[in-house]
């Protein structure tokens, strides 16, 4: 009986680790989005995650929400610096997420400041 219980618990742990590895390491898509950075914040009760939003339309008609992993410290610092500016975000979309990684499936990996197309000189 103990052997069956141990095998069952081991199988459950292995399945969970495989699912986690798939979600974490296998991207669904990769892309680039541009817009005005309207929010970057660290939120959560148990697990604090970095969450942000960019406005891709006029007056916030189209909002793109994203998360940033704690390991991407350079991206977090740039997002804080570029608050309210027009930015280009390079991101990875995952199949799903876990609450300790972020609220969205979109994870920003690189941030660049861009010139707004609304105010060309």
Image (cartoon, rainbow, N blue to C red):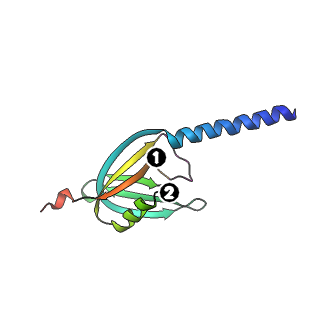
User: As drawn, is 66 to the left or to the right of 11?
Assistant: left
Q: Visible in this render: residue 61?
A: no
User: As drawn, is 11 to the left or to the right of 92?
Assistant: right
Q: Is residue 10 above or below residue 114?
A: above
| Dot 2 or dot 1, earlier in sequence | 2
Q: Picture coordinates of residue 120 (x, y %)?
A: 14, 60
User: Which residue is identified by label 2?
Assistant: 71
Magenta residues (range)? 95-102
Badge 2 element: loop
- What crowding class fits label 1: few (fewer than 14 Cα within 10 Å), some (14-19), or many (20 or more)? many
Of circles 2 and 1, which is in front? 2
Q: Determine the CA span between mark 2 and mark 1.
A: 16 Å
Q: Picture coordinates of residue 17 (x, y %)?
A: 63, 40
Q: Picture coordinates of residue 25 (x, y %)?
A: 51, 41
User: Which residue is identified by label 1?
Assistant: 105
Q: Residue at left 46%, top 57%?
A: 72
């Amino acid at each position: 009986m103990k052997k069956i219980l141990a095998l069952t618990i081991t199988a459950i742990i292995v399945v969970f680790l495989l699912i986690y590895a798939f979600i974490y390491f296998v991207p669904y898509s990769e892309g680039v989005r541009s817009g005005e950075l309207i929010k970057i914040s660290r939120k959560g009760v148990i697990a604090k995650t970095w969450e942000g939003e960019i406005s891709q339309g006029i007056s916030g008609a189209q909002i793109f929400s994203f998360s940033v992993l704690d390991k991407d410290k350079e991206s977090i610092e740039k997002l804080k610096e570029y608050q309210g500016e027009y930015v280009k975000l390079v991101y990875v979309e995952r199949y799903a997420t876990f609450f300790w990684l972020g609220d969205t499936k979109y994870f920003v990996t690189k941030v660049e400041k861009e010139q707004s197309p609304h105010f060309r000189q």
